[in-house]
Amino acid sequence: MIQIKDIHKEFDNTPILKGITTEFKRGKTNLVIGQSGSGKTVLLKILLGLFTPNKGEIYFDGIPFSSMTDDEHRTLRREIGMVFQGSALFDSMSVIENVLFPMRMLTKLSEAERIEQAETVIERVNLIDAKNKLPNEISGGMQKRVAIARAVVMRPKYLFCDEPNSGLDPKTAIVIDNLIQELTKEYNITTVINSHDMNSVMEIGETIVFLKNGTKEWEGSNQNIFKTDNEAVTDFVYSSNLFKKVRKLYLED
Amino acid sequence: MRDNLCKQTLFFYFRQVNILKHVGAYFLMIRLVFIKPTKRSIMYGLVMKEIQDLILGSLGIVCFLSFFVGGVVSIQTALNIDSTFIPENLVGFATRQSIILEFAPTFMAIILAGKVGSYITSSIGTMRVTEQIDALEVMGINSVNFLVFPKLLAMTLLPIVIIFSMFLGIFGGWAATIYGGFSSSASFIEGIQLEFNSFHVFYAFVKTFLFAIILATIPSYHGYYMKGGALDVGRASTVSFVWCSVVIIVVNYFITQLFFS
């Protein structure tokens, strides 16, 4: 579980996050949603340790991040998996080499054990036939699946995904969403997903945090997001005609 | 007029502060290159790949340019000797001195700033743009050590490339002199041997070594700390080439002062 308490962050005296407090539960897909510029990515980068908050604290399973020693930070990093928006695969490495990379860098396993573990995960994301291909030889959806495989190969306790569906067609996006949710349950991971894709919200939003202008505007789940009266949330959720119609049907039911 | 002067002074001040900021960040990056090293087995592979890309990949163009520039130096020297009091072996002597002291180490370094420097900046810059560096950081890997150290180590082999450049430059000079009919082979070779001072070769290698460090680190700095998208990768490559050239020329001046004054 990750707890965030009163996180503030500013860049060049411009406040980006203004006192975010929430918690992300283990074994659940926790979504952070909001418009572009709402502070989602900054929050994610703070969780990853890439940015330091100006104020506030983050607790990873009860341990405050700021009081961790260098060794504890290093251990924590090994327990984190990350799926970047653009996949961030290493261009010069094949699919299997990309998945093997964190194990080669961070574990003392034998090469045979690493390959076995990597192949298991690649098979789990249905890419075993493409394991020797380079990232530029596979589709965007497949690249995302490789990124997921690379993120979970070390069996992380925490998985962060930055807009995992961006640039994908709706069908592939659902495959990616479901894969993330299945792996979250299977490995009992605390998963945090940044998204502004309403399909993801509907599919896998077990807990949802809605950010607006750097503040937490609303918190709930995909079960109650349609029932909320919060104007900012409804503005965001029903920005498309399709969802306006869905809401109408939902309320009629 | 006074307002304009104030504005210019302020602009100059902020520009200096900005340059100092970059110099500070550059040296902080150099410190990061040597801490939290990558596993030796992984580093070995990375260094070999960089030797292939940066050193062996540059050998062809260096040999080609050296041969022809050596030829041009000897032709120019021969054509500018009008007096019969000047011995013919001066052509070989001047070619040797020009190639060993300046052309092979300094001008080759500037040419490599274009080839190797741009390659380093664009490859690291692309990794920055596509979040590959962030991915390394998230995994708890010292990305500066992982990316810059192998390049730095590979570039320390630059003196070997310069040996080829020296040899082929002088050989090109000899070929141009003989086939152009400017001097005899014997007098050219006599000129090459005339008052040979091995300290000059040592000086050339020392500065080549320093240029190698500059060629590995300045482009890496520009690639690593770049911001923006694909267009900015190109811009960073250009800026890195300019700064590499400037620093090489300035360092060359001070090294020459230090060794020969």
Image (cartoon, coloured by chain):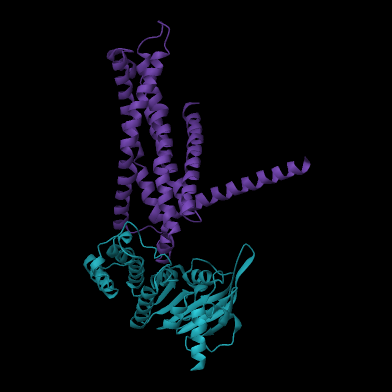
Q: Is residue A230 visible?
A: yes
* Quadrant of the drawing holding the N terminus of chain B: top right
Residue shown at 51% from the left, 86% from the top? A247
Whole-percent x and y of residue A100?
A: 29, 65
Q: Quadrant of residue B191?
A: top left
x then y, percent, for residue A214: 59, 73
| Residue A169 position (above or below residue B161) | below
Q: Residue A174 location in percent, x, y?
A: 38, 77
* Residue A155 location, quadrant: bottom left
Residue A119: quarter of image: bottom left
Name the one closer to the observer, B118 or B203: B118
Q: Colour of chain B?
A: purple
Relative horizontal placement of residue A130, taking residue A18 as reference (left or right): left
Identify the residue shown where x is 28% and y is 13%: B186
Furthest residue in direction right, as rendered: B2
Residue at the extreme top of the image, as rendered: B84
Q: Looking at this view, name the residue that lies furthest to the bottom.
A: A253
Residue A74, x across and y down, in percent = 42, 68
> Residue visible at 49% across and 90% down?
A250
Choose between A185 and B228: the one closer to the eye.
Answer: B228
Q: Can see residue A60?
A: no
Left of A142 or right of it: where is A77? right
Q: On screen, A98 above or below B239?
A: below
* Chain with cyan colouring: A
Along the line of sight, the residue nearer the viewer: B167 or A239: A239
Give the tally of numbered discs: 0
